[in-house]
Image (spheres, rainbow, N blue to C red):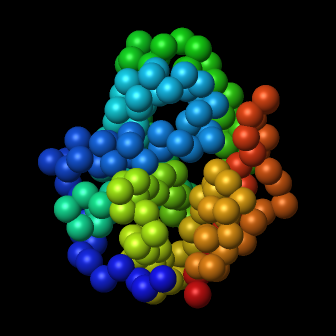
Amino acid sequence: MTEWQGNIRRASTEDAALVTGILAEAFMRDPVSGWIFPEDDHRARAHPAFFGPFVALALRTGEVHVAGDGLGATLWLPVGDDHGADEGDEFATMEAAIGPEAMKRFGVLDELMTVNHPGEPHWYLPFIAVHPDHHGRGIGSALLRDKLAELDAAGTAAYLEASTPRNAALYERLDFRRRPVTLDLPGGPTLYPMWRDPA
């Protein structure tokens, strides 16, 4: 597969709806999202309300990158050093928007992620998404390489949780390594925490 050669830019607040739409569409078949939202119809309705707060948080405290005119996107959050606890209210209305059962399931996931999150300074990639119409073109790899080159230059590590073994294998090609723990959702899928030291 040839590497996608298009433009990658840092998003602004004006791109919030665009990025939320990319995430909402791209994660419709994701196993973790399917566990949080077991019904397809509910997932389709709730996804924008679910992903919107994450986009808002990353725009406010981290970075959001967009490929092309909306082919894919990444959300990055700084962790450690002088990046203290977040004081925002992005998630205040999430339960009302997605429903109590989905919120309960998300709470289980969030606790697992929080307990196992590394304490060393790094940039965290909570979401990377490529619109389903553009899979297989190298857009996701291009988005990752763009930020990882910056982190390498700064001597900064990166961390993510892969939602499938196939995704984990893709990240390994970019020098992420699986940590000696998995995040096993009750009655659901497994996530694979992965760490990348700067090159």
Indicate whether 41 appears above or below 118.
Answer: above
Front residue of this view, candidates 55 and 121 = 55
Residue beneath the point at 75% across and 66% down: 178
In this picture, residue 54 sits left or right of residue 8: right
Furthest residue to the left? Answer: 14
Indicate whether 53 appears above or below 68.
Answer: above
In this picture, residue 140 sits left or right of residue 10: right
The reply to whether residue 153 is in sight is yes
Quarter holding the C terminus is bottom right
Q: Quadrant of residue 134?
A: bottom left
Residue beneath the point at 35% across and 56% down: 133
Q: Position of residue 42 (x, y in %)?
A: 46, 21
Indicate whether 26 appears above or below 1.
Answer: above
Residue beneath the point at 38% across and 24% down: 45
Front residue of this view, candidates 64 and 25 = 25
In this picture, residue 125 sits left or right of residue 97: right
Q: Position of residue 11 (x, y in %)?
A: 24, 58
Q: Position of residue 22 (x, y in %)?
A: 33, 48
Residue beneath the point at 64% across and 51% down: 163
Front residue of this view, candidates 181 and 165 = 165
Front residue of this view, candidates 14 and 42 = 42
Q: Quadrant of residue 20?
A: top left
The reply to whether residue 150 is in sight is no
Q: Quadrant of residue 100?
A: top right
Q: Position of residue 65 (x, y in %)?
A: 32, 62
Indicate whether 65 appears above or below 97.
Answer: below
